[in-house]
Amino acid sequence: MKRLTKAQLNIIARQTLAKTAEVGWENAQKNLPYIKKTILGLRSEASKRVADSAIIASAGPSLHRRHPAPAILAAKFKGPVVAADGALGYCLRNGLIPDYVVTVDPHPARIIRWFGDPALAHREADDYFQRQDLDPALHKEGEARNQELLDLVNKHGRGIKAIISTSVNPEVALRCLEAGMELYWWNPLYDDYDAANSYSRRVYQLTKAPCMVTGGNCGTSAWVFAHAVLHSKRTALLGMDLSYPPNTSIQNTQYYKEMVELFGDRAEEAFIRVYNPYLKETWYTDPTYYWYRQSLLDLARQADCETYNCTEGGIVFGKGIKFTILKDFLERFS
């Protein structure tokens, strides 16, 4: 199995840091008035749970292709359901109300869409949601779907705890508060805490919220939260593809525009094909998603919890990951 070299990993890590850290730092300063609780306040709650299994719902295409919500509801799963922000709409539309929703991306306008955007009509045109399979429900009738999501989040918000990074745009924090969510804050571990001019140290000293590894994305952040804060002994991953189905056009991939900027008309050559022996399919991914995959596998190998990939798609398999189907996980651990 191909692995990115240390040099390649460092390049992607530096690019990710450059893209997010300064904006995250600025957002943390703006979010200070809303920081009342941190994720440390959830540890006592977690210790009282009877169930020691958790489900993580991420926003990969398999979440919609496999449609796992009915099976989870039918099994009466007793453990916590943790949704990445991009999976929140799918969960709510299908009656699966997550206990927690995790959000981390500092983008100034896109992330609030996952919660229903009160200002959508006034945003600049953006094909980000229409171009991808993150949530097919947003492909058409954007304003109507946005209103539906506004209503659903408002209806169920009081029962959902927001695991909210200090890096997010303050509009996201306000939207969560508007919906009645309790906010539990944390900081992304941007870099080496002990390094000179460390963003991680600066943001911790500012907010006093604990730092948490993200693996570069919201889905892995949700997995880390379930393991480190909820102390789940086993977690099931849903929608954690970190790749694209074989028939997906490269124009419909998340980082297509960035790939074109880097590689021009040779962008397609930069995508990585990965054969999944469990699915007997070859999926493809871009260097950033492949870095996310490698980071998650490294974390899973080090963790003292069991990780079951029940996505039934994608490329997340290897040592530390039990690749299985959701039905088997629910029969054993509901």
Image (cartoon, grey):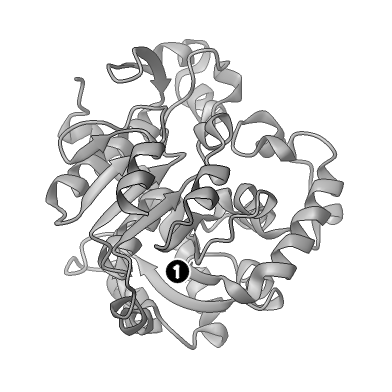
Provide residue 26's location: percent of width, then percent of height: 51, 70
Q: Is residue 215 visible?
A: no
Q: Is residue 292 left or right of residue 244?
A: left
Q: Is residue 69 visible?
A: yes
| Residue at x 26% of width, y 67% of height | 231
| Residue at x 40% of width, y 82% of height | 207
Residue type highlighted by circle 1? Trp
**Image quadrant where one finds the N terminus:** top left
| Residue at x 68% of width, y 34% of height | 136
Provide residue 269's location: percent of width, then percent of height: 41, 11
| Residue at x 40% of width, y 81% of height | 38
Provide residue 117's location: percent of width, then percent of height: 75, 59
Q: Is residue 225 left or right of residue 168?
A: left
**Image quadrant where one finds the C terminus:** bottom left
Image position of 5 with respect to 63: above or below = above
What residue is disc 1 on? Answer: 25
49 or 19: nearer the eye?
A: 49
Image position of 166 with respect to 291: above or below = below
Q: Secondary structure at mark 1?
A: helix
Q: Is residue 56 left or right of residue 91?
A: left
Q: Is residue 76 left or right of residue 91?
A: left
